[in-house]
Image (cartoon, rainbow, N blue to C red):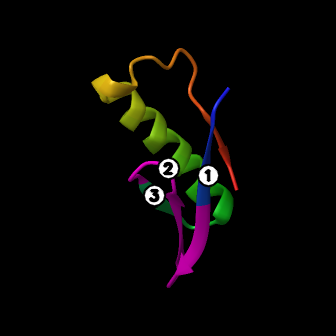
Amino acid sequence: MRSLKYVVYSEGKYFVSQCLNVDVSSFGKTIDEAVANLKDAVELYLKDDPACSFYHTFPQLTK
């Protein structure tokens, strides 16, 4: 399984999570929420991108 790297940083009252391999980011009130939201966003991005249709399972996110 392929893995995607991400970073999390604080922005005011929220945490921003940003995938380094694809141009997708998300946020949440906690780090865990920001990472979970990023995972959902990346899965939607890859699902809707015809160039990524070769994924049978979605990549893991790794810090």
Residue appearing at x 58%, y 74% in the figure: 9
Q: Secondary structure at mark 2?
A: loop
Judged by depth in the image, the label closer to the viewer, 3 or 2, is 2
Mark 2 near mark 1, Cβ–Cβ under 8 Å?
A: yes
Image-quadrant location for residue 61: top right
Task: Write down the region rendered in magenta.
Answer: 7-24
Location of residue 4 in the rendering, given as x and y in whole percent from the top left corner: 59, 44
The residue singled out by tag 1 in the image is 5
Is 23 on the left or on the right of 27, as rendered?
left
The residue singled out by tag 2 in the image is 21
* Three-letter amino acid code of the residue under disc 2: Asn
Measured in 3D between alpha carbons, the distance from the residue under mark 2 to the one under mark 1, in whole angstroms, is 6 Å
Location of residue 12 in the rendering, given as x and y in whole percent from the top left corner: 50, 85
* Three-letter amino acid code of the residue under disc 3: Ser
Q: Is residue 38 shown in magenta?
A: no
Prevalent SS, magenta region: strand
Of pointers 2 and 1, the one earlier in the residue sequence: 1
Mark 1 near mark 3, Cβ–Cβ under 8 Å?
A: no
Location of residue 6 in the rendering, given as x and y in whole percent from the top left corner: 59, 57
Image height of 32 relative to 44, above or below: below
